[in-house]
Image (tube, rainbow, N blue to C red):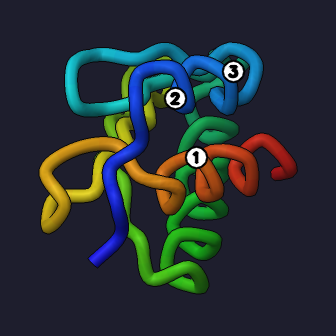
Amino acid sequence: MADLLSDEEIEAQLPDGWERDGDEIVKTYEFDAYLDGVGFAAGVGGVAQDAFHHPEITIGWREVEIRLTTHDAGGITENDIDLAARIEDL
């Protein structure tokens, strides 16, 4: 099981545009068209599967919200920060 990050570690390592929401980190991506968001969500799913770390993905009208937490650790770990950074590279 991964170790929880401290508040200071989380703030220092969060990728641009990501925010902390309790025991999760979250970012909402906006798109010009609904299907662009669906395609992005599929890409996130592939990256997540490769990392074996699975976010909550909410697809809305022209936006996709990604939420990350490490459930078995009970909060935010390096796994969440790493996956957020990989998502940013999509």
The residue tagged 3 is 31
Name the residue located 61 percent from the left edge and 40 percent from the top edge.
Answer: 35
Which label sits in the foreground, 2 or 1? 2
| Left or right relative to 17: residue 18 | left
| Nearer to the camera, 22 or 58 | 22
- Measured in 3D between alpha carbons, the distance from the residue under mark 3 to the one under mark 2, in whole angstroms, is 27 Å
User: Residue at the spot x=27%, y=78% of the render?
Assistant: 1
- Residue located beneath label 1 in the image: 81
Is 34 left or right of 86, judged from the image as shown?
left
Q: Residue at x 73, y 47 (%)?
A: 85
- Identified by mark 1, the residue type is Ile
Mark 2 crowdedness (10 Å alpha carbons): few <14, some 14-19, many ≥20: some
For discs 3 and 1, the disc positioned in front in the rendered view: 1
Disc 2 + disc 1, Cβ < 8 Å: yes
- Residue type at tag 3: Phe
When the figure is inspected, residue 23 is found, relative to residue 68, above or below; the finding is above
| Residue located 52% across and 70% down the image | 48
Q: Earlier in the sequence, mark 3 or mark 1?
A: 3
In the displayed structure image, the side of residue 6 where residue 34 appears, left or right: right
Left or right? Give the position of 46 relative to 90: left
